[in-house]
C-alpha cells in the first residue's frame, strides 16, 4: 500500500476523533493534531519525492497504488503523484493547517464545522492524488458539497443565497465535467479492449479529433467554473464574502486550484489537439477575467470582496498561463496556483482576524490599524506586497515566469493578450496600496478601535505558517520550479506532438 | 417446488398471519407486529440461499438467478418498510387493524414476485393485478381521513384504467402472434404497425405503474393522501418491481424492436426527469415533494434501460437497490415526524437540526444520496447510469439529464437548508423515536454508506443478469 493513502486516512481518522470528542476544546485539538500530522506527512512526501527524483527515479508518477474496484466498468482505485501534484498537496496541507488555527473562535456547532472542513480537505487531497478519472470526480464532488453547509451555517451576510449560488454553479460545472469524463471513457479504447478511466492510460492513446473537439469545451468549462473562468466566476465574490474565515481561506486557497489543476491535468493533457484549436476562445475569456477581476477589486469597499475579485484575477491568470501551452508558462501557472493559494489564504485569514476585532469589513470605516495591531498590519502589508508581485515574495516568481512564458508565443494575438494581462499588475498595485493606505496607515478614525488587541497565539501560528510559505517560495523558488517542470514532461510531449498535426 | 420458494414462503407467512389474526382479540392485535417482522426477516434471509433455477406450469413461471435476486431486493425493502411502520401502527386509531397492513402488503409482494417470474403475459397480468389492488386498500387505510380515502379511490381508478390499457395491448399481441408465452412471442415481433401499437399500449400501462410523465398525474395526490409508509411502499417497492419486469420484457420480448422503444424512452426520459424536477421545486408538502422527486428518479432509472445493454440493465437494477435505501431513509424520517407531530411541510422542518440532530442527519444523507453526492451510494448509481447511457452514445440525453441533476440538487438542498440553516422560533420539539424507527433508519444509512463502496454487489448483479441475454 502506498503511503499516499495516508492523505485520505488521516482526515477520516480525524473526523472519527472529532465525532468522539466531548467538548469544544477537545474538538479543536483533535483537528489540530490531525492536520499537523497531515502537514508533516506532506512535508515528508515532498522530501521523499525530491530524494527519489535526485536518485534518478524518473517514472512519470511515483508512489503508485493500483487496486481494482469495479471490475465490470474497469474502475480502479489508482493513486500516484508527480511533481505538480506533490506541490499542490503541500499547498493544501499548509492552508488547511493554517485554516484550523484561523477558525479557533468558532462557537456555534464546532464539531460540525470542523467535520465539514476536514471532509472538504480530504476531498481535495483525494483529488490531487487520484489518477483515475472516477475517483478524481468522486473526490472533486466530495470537496465541493461541504461548502454549502460551511457557508450556509457559519457564514455572514446573505449566506443562504451565496451558499446556494456557489453550490449550484460548482455542481453545474461538475455536471459538465462528468459528461466530459464519460466521453473520455467511451473513447478510451479506440483499438478495442476494455474501456478505462485511467488517466495515464488515456494520455497514451490518441483520441480522434472530432471527439476531442466535442469533449474539450465541457471539460475546460466544467473545471473552469471552479477556476473562476470569466463569465462563470460570479459565485466566487459572493461565496467568498459570505464564507467564514477558514472556509474563504480553503476555498480561495485550495478549492479554486482544483479548477486550474483539472483544466491542466484533464482537459489540456488528455485533449491536446482540441486545446490547440479551441484554446484561443478560452484565452480571450481568461484575459478578460484577469483584467476584469483587477478592476472589480478596485471598485469594492468590502475587504472580502476586494480579495475575492483579486482571486478571480489571479486564478484567471492561471488559466491564461495554461493556455499558453509552453513549458515556462505552465510552470508559472503551477507556481501561481501555489503562490496565490498561500497568499490569498493569508489575506482571508487576516481579514477574518481584522473583522473579528473591528466588526466591520468596510475599509472606509477603518483606519490607522497599524498603531493598534502592528503584527496583523505588517502581515497584511506582506500579503499585499506578495500579491502585487514584489521580488522576494512568491507572487513575483509566479507572475514573472508566466509572462516570460506567455511572451514566447510570438504571434500578434498572444502578444496582445499577454500585454493586456500584464497590465493588470499595475491595477493590482493600485488596489492593494489603496487598501493598505486607508486601512492601516493614517489616524485611527474610530475611537473604539484604540482598545483593539493584537493577534492572539493561534492567529500568530496561522499567519506565520503562511508567511513562511510565501517567503520560502519567493526566496528559494528553484527546487519548486524544478520539481514542477519535471512533472510537466508528459504534457509538453503531448502538446508538442499535437502542434505539427494542426499546422 | 423449491423453484417457487420465494412465493411459497411469502404465502406461508401471509396465511400464518391471517390465522393468528382470527384468534387474536381486538385489543391484542398489535402483538402481531414483532412476529410479523421476524417472519419477514426470516423469509428475506432464506431468500438468499442459492436456489435452483427452473420453469413451472409449462413455462408460465420461470425462476432464474436474476429473478431470485430481484425478489431478494424487494424483500429487503419490504422488511425495512415493516420496521419503519411500527411506530405508526402502534397509534390508537390503527391498533385494531395492524394485521391487515401486513397481510395486504404481503399479498402485493406475492403479486410482484409472480410478475417478475412470469414467462407468459397471462401470468404477468395476474401478478400485476394482485400487486395493484391491495395497495389501493392500503392507501385508504386511514379511512377516518378524507384525503386517505380519496387517495385510495384515485389509485384504484388509475390502476383500473392502466390495467385496461395494458390488457388491450396484450390482446393485440395475442392477435398478431397467436401466443402469450414470452419465448414464443419474441421471435414473432417484427415491428408491424399493430405490434408497435400493442407495444405502446403495453408500455402506457407500465408507465402508469412507474409513474412516468405524462402518466404521473395520480402520483402526488396519492402519496399525499396515503399513510407515509404506504407512500414509501408505492414509491420504492411497487415502482422497483414494475421497473424490473419492464426491463425483462423489453429486453426479452421486444428485443427486436429496440430501435422503436429506445426512441420512445428517449422522449419519455426527458419529459419525466424535467417535469418531475420542475414540479418538485414548487412543493411545500414533503410527501408531494418526495412524490415528484421519485418521478424524476424513475426517469433516471430508464436512462439505464435505454439502448439495451447488459451494463445498462445491471445499473438500472443497481440504481433501484440504491434508490430503495435512499428513499426509504427520507420517507422514514418524514414518517416519524409526521406521526409524532403531524407536521409535513418543508417550513415545519426549519431548525430541525438544533432539536433532532440525528433525524436531520439521516434526512440529509438520504437526500444527498438521492441527489447523487459522494461518497453515498446514490453517487455511484447515478455515475454508472450516466456511464451506461454515454456508452450507448446518448450524449445529448446525458447532458439534459445532467442539467436536471442540478435542478434536483437545488430542491434537495432546500430541505437541507430548512433543517440546518434556517432558524425557527417554534421548531419541532425534541422527541425520542422508538427503537424500530431507529433500526429502520440505521439500516437505510448503512445501505447508503456500503452499497457504493462494496463493488461486489454491482459485480454480482452484472454476473446474474447474464441470464437474460
Image: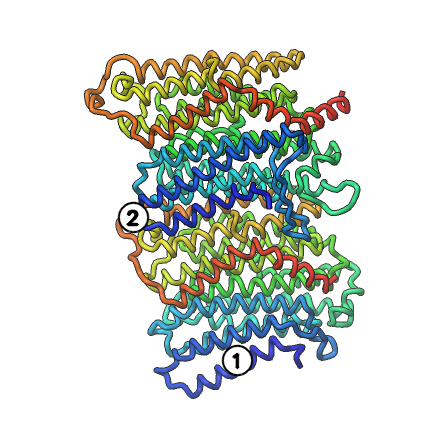
Please state which of residues B266 and A273 is positioned toward the viewer in this rendering.
A273
Please state which of residues A12 and B58 is positioned toward the viewer in this rendering.
A12
Q: How is the image coloured?
A: rainbow
Where, quadrant-wise, is the C terminus of chain A in this rendering?
top right
Badge 2 density bin: few <14, some 14–19, many ≥20, Cα 10 Å: some
User: How many marks on residues?
Assistant: 2
Residue B446 image position (x, y, % from top left): 49, 59
Asked if both marks, 1 and 2, belong to the same chain, the answer given is: yes
Residue A393 image position (x, y, % from top left): 47, 17
**Furthest residue in direction front, as rendered:** A55
Mark 1–mark 2 CB contact (< 8 Å): no
Q: Name the residue beneath numbered marker 1.
A: B13
Give me the residue at 64% from left, 66% from top.
B166
Position of residue A290 in the picture relative to residue A347 (left or right): right
Q: Name the residue beneath numbered marker 2.
A: B424
Position of residue A262 in the picture relative to residue A149 (left or right): right
Element under disc 1:
helix
Q: Specify whether residue A395 is in view.
A: no
Give me the residue at 55% from left, 75% from top.
B43
- Relative vertical location of residue B159 with respect to residue A58 in this rendering, above or below: below
Element under disc 2:
loop
Position of residue B248 in the picture relative to residue A246 (left or right): right
Residue B241 image position (x, y, % from top left): 59, 65
Amino acid at each position: 500500500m502506498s503511503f499516499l493513502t495516508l492523505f485520505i486516512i488521516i482526515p477520516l481518522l480525524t473526523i472519527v476523533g472529532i465525532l468522539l470528542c466531548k467538548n469544544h476544546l477537545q474538538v479543536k485539538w483533535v483537528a489540530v493534531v490531525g492536520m499537523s500530522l497531515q502537514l508533516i506527512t506532506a512535508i515528508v512526501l515532498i522530501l521523499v519525492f525530491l530524494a527519489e527524483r535526485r536518485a534518478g527515479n524518473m517514472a512519470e508518477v511515483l508512489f503508485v497504488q493500483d487496486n481494482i474496484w469495479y471490475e465490470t466498468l474497469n474502475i480502479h482505485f489508482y493513486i500516484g503523484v508527480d511533481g505538480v501534484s506533490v506541490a499542490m498537496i503541500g499547498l493544501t496541507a499548509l492552508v488547511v493547517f493554517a485554516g484550523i488555527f484561523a477558525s479557533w473562535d468558532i462557537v456555534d456547532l464546532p464539531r460540525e464545522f470542523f467535520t465539514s472542513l476536514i471532509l472538504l480537505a480530504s476531498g481535495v487531497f483525494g483529488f490531487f492524488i487520484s489518477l483515475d478519472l472516477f475517483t478524481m470526480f468522486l473526490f472533486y464532488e466530495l470537496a465541493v458539497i461541504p461548502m454549502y453547509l460551511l457557508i450556509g451555517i457559519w457564514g455572514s451576510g446573505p449566506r443562504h443565497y451565496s451558499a446556494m449560488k456557489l453550490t449550484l454553479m460548482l455542481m453545474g460545472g461538475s455536471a459538465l465535467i462528468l459528461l466530459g469524463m464519460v466521453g473520455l471513457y467511451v473513447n478510451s479504447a479506440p483499438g478495442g479492449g476494455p474501456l478505462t478511466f485511467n488517466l495515464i492510460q488515456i494520455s497514451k492513446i490518441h483520441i480522434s479529433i472530432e471527439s476531442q473537439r466535442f469533449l474539450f469545451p465541457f471539460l475546460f468549462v466544467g473545471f473552469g467554473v471552479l477556476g473562476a473562468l470569466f463569465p462563470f466566476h460570479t459565485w466566487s465574490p459572493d461565496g467568498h464574502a459570505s464564507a467564514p474565515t477558514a472556509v474563504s481561506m480553503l476555498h480561495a486557497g485550495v478549492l479554486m486550484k482544483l479548477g486550474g489543476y483539472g483544466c491542466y491535468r484533464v482537459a489540456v493533457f488528455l485533449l491536446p489537439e482540441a486545446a490547440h484549436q479551441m484554446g484561443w476562445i478560452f484565452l480571450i475569456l481568461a484575459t478578460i477575467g484577469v483584467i476584469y477581476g483587477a478592476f472589480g477589486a478596485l471598485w469594492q469597499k468590502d475587504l472580502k470582496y476586494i480579495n475575492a475579485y483579486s482571486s478571480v484575477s489571479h486564478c484567471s491568470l492561471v488559466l491564461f498561463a495554461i493556455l499558453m501551452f509552453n513549458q515556462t508558462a505552465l510552470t508559472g501557472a503551477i507556481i501561481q496556483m501555489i503562490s496565490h493559494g498561500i497568499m490569498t489564504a493569508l489575506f482571508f485569514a487576516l481579514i477574518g482576524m481584522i473583522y473579528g476585532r473591528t466588526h466591520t469589513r468596510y475599509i472606509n470605516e477603518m483606519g490607522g490599524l497599524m498603531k493598534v495591531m502592528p503584527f496583523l498590519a505588517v502581515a497584511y502589508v506582506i500579503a499585499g506586497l506578495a500579491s502585487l508581485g514584489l521580488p522576494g515574495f512568491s507572487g513575483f516568481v509566479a507572475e514573472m515566469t508566466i509572462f516570460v512564458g506567455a511572451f514566447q508565443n510570438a504571434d500578434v494575438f498572444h502578444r496582445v493578450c499577454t500585454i493586456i494581462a500584464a497590465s493588470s499588475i499595475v491595477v493590482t498595485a493600485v488596489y492593494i496600496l489603496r487598501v493598505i493606505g486607508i486601512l492601516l496607515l493614517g489616524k485611527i478614525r474610530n475611537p473604539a478601535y484604540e482598545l483593539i488587541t493584537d493577534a492572539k497565539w493561534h492567529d500568530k501560528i496561522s499567519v506565520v505558517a503562511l508567511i513562511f510559505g510565501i517567503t520560502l517560495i519567493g526566496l528559494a523558488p528553484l527546487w519548486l520550479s524544478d520539481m514542477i517542470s519535471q512533472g510537466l514532461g508528459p504534457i509538453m510531449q503531448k502538446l508538442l506532438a499535437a502542434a505539427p498535426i494542426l499546422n | 417446488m423449491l423453484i417457487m420458494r420465494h412465493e411459497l414462503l411469502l404465502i406461508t407467512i401471509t396465511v400464518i398471519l391471517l390465522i393468528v389474526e382470527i384468534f387474536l382479540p381486538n385489543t391484542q392485535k398489535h402483538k402481531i407486529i414483532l412476529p410479523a417482522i421476524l417472519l419477514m426477516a426470516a423469509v428475506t434471509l432464506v431468500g438468499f440461499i442459492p436456489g435452483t433455477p427452473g420453469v413451472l406450469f409449462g413455462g408460465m413461471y420461470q425462476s432464474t438467478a436474476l429473478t431470485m435476486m430481484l425478489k431478494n431486493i424487494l424483500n429487503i425493502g419490504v422488511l425495512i418498510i415493516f420496521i419503519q411502520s411500527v411506530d405508526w401502527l402502534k397509534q390508537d386509531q390503527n391498533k385494531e387493524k395492524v394485521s391487515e397492513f401486513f397481510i395486504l402488503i404481503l399479498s402485493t409482494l406475492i403479486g410482484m414476485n409472480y410478475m417478475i417470474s412470469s414467462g407468459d403475459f397471462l401470468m404477468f397480468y395476474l401478478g400485476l393485478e394482485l400487486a395493484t389492488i391491495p395497495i389501493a386498500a392500503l392507501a385508504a387505510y386511514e379511512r377516518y381521513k378524507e384525503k386517505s380515502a380519496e387517495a385510495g379511490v384515485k389509485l384504484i381508478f388509475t390502476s383500473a384504467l392502466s390495467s385496461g390499457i395494458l390488457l388491450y395491448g396484450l390482446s393485440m399481441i395475442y392477435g398478431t402472434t397467436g401466443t402469450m408465452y414470452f419465448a414464443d412471442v419474441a421471435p414473432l415481433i417484427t415491428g408491424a404497425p399493430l405490434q408497435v401499437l400493442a407495444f405502446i399500449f403495453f408500455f402506457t400501462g407500465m408507465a402508469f405503474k412507474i409513474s412516468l410523465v405524462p402518466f404521473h398525474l395520480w402520483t402526488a395526490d396519492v402519496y399525499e393522501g396515503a399513510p407515509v409508509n404506504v407512500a414509501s411502499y408505492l414509491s420504492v417497492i411497487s415502482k422497483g418491481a414494475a421497473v424490473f419486469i419492464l426491463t425483462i420484457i423489453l429486453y426479452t420480448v421486444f428485443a427486436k424492436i429496440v430501435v422503436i422503444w429506445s426512441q420512445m424512452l428517449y422522449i419519455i426520459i426527458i419529459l419525466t426527469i424535467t417535469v418531475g424536477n420542475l414540479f418538485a421545486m414548487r412543493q411545500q408538502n414533503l410527501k408531494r415533494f418526495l412524490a415528484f422527486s421519485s418521478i424524476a428518479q424513475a426517469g433516471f432509472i430508464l436512462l439505464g434501460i435505454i439502448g439495451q445493454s447488459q451494463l445498462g440493465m445491471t445499473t438500472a437494477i443497481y440504481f433501484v437497490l440504491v434508490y430503495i435505501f435512499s428513499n426509504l431513509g427520507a420517507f422514514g424520517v418524514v414518517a416519524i415526524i409526521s406521526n409524532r407531530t403531524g407536521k409535513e411541510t418543508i417550513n415545519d422542518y426549519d431548525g430541525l437540526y438544533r432539536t433532532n440532530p440525528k433525524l436531520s442527519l439521516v434526512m440529509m444523507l438520504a437526500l444527498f444520496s438521492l441527489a447523487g453526492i459522494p461518497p453515498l451510494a446514490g453517487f455511484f448509481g447515478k455515475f454508472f447510469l450516466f456511464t451506461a447511457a454515454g456508452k450507448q452514445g446518448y450524449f445529448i440525453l446525458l447532458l439534459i439529464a445532467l442539467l436536471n441533476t442540478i435542478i434536483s440538487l437545488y430542491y434537495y438542498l432546500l430541505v437541507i437548508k430548512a433543517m440546518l440553516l434556517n432558524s425557527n422560533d417554534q421548531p419541532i420539539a425534541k422527541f425520542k423515536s422508538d427503537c424500530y424507527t431507529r433500526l429502520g433508519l440505521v439500516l437505510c444509512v448503512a445501505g447508503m454508506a456500503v452499497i457504493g463502496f462494496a463493488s461486489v454487489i454491482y459485480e454480482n448483479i452484472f454476473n446474474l443478469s447474464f441470464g437474460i441475454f
